[in-house]
Structure formats: structure tokens, C-alpha cells
DNA sequence: GACAGCCTACCTTCAGATAGGTAGTCTCCA
DNA sequence: TGGAGACTACCTATCTGAAGGTAGGCTGTC
């Protein structure tokens, strides 16, 4: 059953990083949660940096498959963008922030390869959103005269920051607002499709 | 000269927190930078949490005075909003993220009083921006049919997230884009006043 | 019997923190 | 006006605990 314990460790580590940060969780925490000794973790992840890298790689893969699912399941650009934002909303309601945001905060203490995967994640996200917007404009579904990449970068910033603000000020969900303002800027005023 | 060393310690600590995070800097780092022993730091800040609290309190005060300066120095709402965004741009160009963003990431490892000051900071920021927008709408300087608080929350999210994304992807300054999209949503298309 | 997967035992380093001491400065009253 | 006592701002020495990590041994399965 190779990889099972490793995955359990990643499952345990991810929320810890997303809630406390990379430097504030320890092998001891993981060991307690998974039910093995700290030394045994080193069998699966020789160094903590290896774990961070695997964690981020898995996170990137899960984004890829989530985007593929969205593309299969949604017919309109609006639906797809709404579904994308919904991914962040799920993170928000769990009281966490994005793994990327967390790791970006601790950037200078992270090994370079991990930073690279963080960049890949953000690049993929922004690119995908920009592509969606461009398609929406092309088909006439959206009315946005500017550069789709701008709107995408702005949305990603808002989502990442919104997660942080929501956590810092419990009871003030920012993603709702970010989402509403985003759709408005795309010429889709009124209700937010992801909320329906 | 009471408070001098204490201020030096805060001066040394702030960039460390903004670049590495709260849990990734130590009294040893501070001691080396200021030129005293780690034990002496405890004279000024008995516990690390006390230092964090003082740091955040000072940060909040500097925001207050920055806002006061902006109100004195700018006559139009557009100028004031531009100057506000410029505060974040300075942080961006120094390669750091907002102290609030950093501390919000490490939220669960911080003592409660520190979290309170973070909330105060964000509340002040959002409230001030919302007030500016409301005034701009009232005087006709801005054309924004929605709730000023929404636009303010969205801007703050974008600025906080933009700082994180700019750091995670060096060479992709996100605040420019966030700023441009923000002003566009206020009915002020075209150039960004803060950039001129 | 080879190997995966876990264990115990141990190491080094560093974290924040405390105790107690000292040099210099300030204050105040005989 | 000068000295006693208090105070400030640092020091050295030391503690406890936890961090990540290593070495080598046990056990069950193919």
C-alpha cells in the first residue's frame, strides 16, 4: 500500500500549513495526527522541504483536475468562472487560506523548488481565468473592453487577499464582495451566478 | 533615551515579519541586527507576543498618520485614493507584504490581542476607503452605483492579495492591475492617477 | 531472504525565557 | 553639595523544550 501513509501525512499537513503557516507546524503535529512516530515521517519525506514540495505539487495537480472538471461540467463562461470562484469559497468557509498564499508569505524561508511550484499554480490559475474571459468576450457573453489578463490578475489578487481578510476579520466574508465586483467589471451586473 | 532601543528592535523586526513571517524570525536575528544580546530584548519585550503587539500597534498608528497626511495633502477623492494605493505600492517595491497579511497568515499561532490590532487596522483601512468613495459619489467625482463598502472591501482584498502574488511571482507587479481595475469600476476609466 | 514500513534511541541546534549581576545615571534630602 | 538609594539598560550564565534529522533494529509480507 505504498503511498498511503504518505498521503495521510499530506492530508494532515495541508490544513496545518493553510491555517498556521509552514514554519508553525512540525513533524510532531503530523505524527500525532497520523499515528506514527516523527522519525517514521522521514522515511516518506526525508526533509521538511520535501514534504512542502510534495504538498504543493499535489495541490497543483488537484487544481488541474478541478479545472478539467469545471470545463466538462459547465457550458457557459459565466458558469465556469463561478465554479472557479467557488473553489476559493470552500477554502474560505473552512477558515483557511490558499496554500499558495500561505507559502508565499513564508517565501524567504522556503527552498527554491517549492517556490517554483507556487509560481506554476498561480500562473495556471491566472492563465485559465484569462482564457475564460477572452472566450466570453469573443462569444459576446461578457462585455469587457480591457485586457482579459488584467481582469484575471485582479480577480486572483482579490481572491487571495479576500481569504486573508476573511480570516483576519471573522464574520466579514470578503469573497462574496470580490466575486460581485468582479462580475460587475465584466459587464454582468446583478446576481452572482456562483451563489445561486 | 527610553524607547530608543525598543524602536530599533521594532525597526529590525518589522521587515523580518513582512518578509519571513512571524514564526520564522527569532530574537537572535534581532539581537544581531541591533547589537545587543537576546536576553536584553526581553527587557524591552518580555515575550515575543509583546513585541508582535507593539509592532502591530505602531503599524496601526503609522496608518493613522498616513491617512491624516493624505487628507491634508490631497484635495480630490481621486488623489486620496491614489495616495492610499501608493502606500501599498511602496511595500510591493520593497519585496515585502503587508504586516497585516503576514500576521493574518500566522493567525492561529498569534495571541488574541495581536489579532485584535490586525482587525483594527483592516477595519480602519476599509472604512476610510469606503468613506472616500461615498464622498466621491456624493460630489459627482465618481460614478459608482453600488455600495461603497463593497468597493472598499474589494480593493483591500486586491491590494493584500496583490502584494502576495507580486512576491510569489517576481516580475509580475499585480498592484498596477488591481489599481487600474479598481478605478475603472468607479467609473474613472483611463489612466491611473497614482501612476502619473 | 529481501524489502517496505515502522520502531526506539539518540543527536545537534536553536527557540524563547529566567535569574541574578553590574555599570552608569538620576533623584532627593541632610 | 555630596552621597545613599533607586532605576535603567544592558550583561553572562543557564534552563527547558522542541525542532528537524540520523542510525540502526524489528516485523510482516511477497
Image: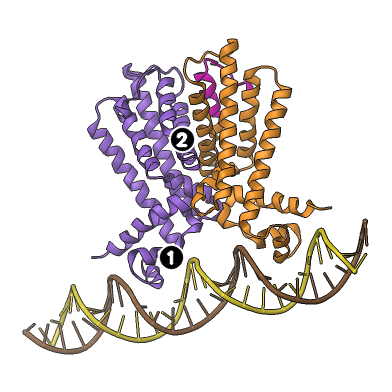
Chain colours: A orange, B purple, C yellow, D brown
Q: Quadrant of the C terminus of chain B?
A: top left
Q: Please, is residue A150 above or below residue A172 in the view?
A: above
What residue sits 52% from the left and 21% below the top? A148
Q: Secondary structure at mark 2?
A: loop
Q: Is residue B38 magenta?
A: no
- Give whichever of B103, B176 is nearer the camera: B176
- Can you give x and y, in whole percent of width and height, for residue B37 in the image? 38, 72
- Give whichever of B162, A50 is nearer the camera: A50
Q: Please, is residue D1 above or below residue B61 in the view?
A: below
Q: Is residue A21 something that shows in the picture?
A: yes
- Give whichever of B129, A41 is nearer the camera: A41
What residue sits 36% from the left and 66% below the top? B44
- Can you give x and y, in whole percent of width and height, for residue A44 in the image? 72, 58
Asked whether, in this view, residue B19 is left or right of residue D21, the answer is: left
Characterize the magenta stretch by its predominant secondary structure.
helix
What residue sits 66% from the left and 42% below the top? A59
What residue sits 47% from the left and 53% below the top? B20
Asked whether, in this view, residue B62 is left or right of residue A1, the answer is: left
Q: Is residue A183 magenta?
A: yes
Q: Quadrant of the N terminus of chain B?
A: bottom left
Q: Which mark is residue B179?
A: none
Chain letter for mark 2, please. Answer: B
From mark 2 to mark 1, how far is it between C-alphas? 33 Å
Quarter of image, res B82: top left
Asked whether, in this view, residue D26 is left or right of residue B3, the answer is: right
- Give whichever of A32, A47 is nearer the camera: A47
Asked whether, in this view, residue B68 is left or right of residue B168, the answer is: left
Chain letter for mark 1, please. Answer: B
Q: Which mark is residue B27?
A: 1
Q: Is residue A97 something that shows in the picture?
A: no
Q: Which residues are magenta?
A: A176-196
Q: Which residue is mark 2?
A: B172
Amino acid at each position: 500500500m505504498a503511498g498511503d501513509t504518505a498521503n495521510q501525512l499530506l492530508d494532515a499537513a495541508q490544513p496545518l500549513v493553510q491555517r498556521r503557516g509552514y514554519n508553525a507546524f512540525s513533524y510532531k503535529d503530523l505524527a500525532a495526527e497520523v499515528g506514527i512516530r516523527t522519525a517514521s515521517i522521514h522515511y516518506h519525506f526525508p526533509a521538511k522541504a520535501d514534504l512542502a514540495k510534495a504538498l504543493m505539487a499535489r495541490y497543483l495537480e488537484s487544481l488541474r483536475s478541478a479545472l478539467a472538471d469545471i470545463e466538462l461540467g459547465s457550458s457557459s463562461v459565466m458558469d465556469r468562472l463561478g465554479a472557479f470562484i467557488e473553489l476559493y469559497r470552500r477554502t474560505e468557509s473552512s477558515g483557511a487560506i490558499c496554500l499558495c498564499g500561505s507559502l508565499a508569505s513564508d517565501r524567504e524561508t522556503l527552498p527554491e523548488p517549492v517556490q517554483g511550484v507556487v509560481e506554476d499554480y498561480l500562473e495556471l490559475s491566472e492563465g485559465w481565468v484569462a482564457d475564460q474571459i477572452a472566450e466570453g468576450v469573443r462569444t459576446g457573453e461578457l462585455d469587457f473592453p480591457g485586457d482579459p489578463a488584467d481582469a484575471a490578475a485582479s480577480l486572483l489578487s482579490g481572491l487571495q487577499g479576500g481569504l486573508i481578510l476573511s480570516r483576519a476579520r471573522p464574520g466579514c466574508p470578503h469573497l462574496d464582495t470580490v466575486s460581485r465586483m468582479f462580475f460587475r467589471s465584466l459587464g454582468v451586473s446583478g446576481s452572482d451566478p456562483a451563489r445561486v
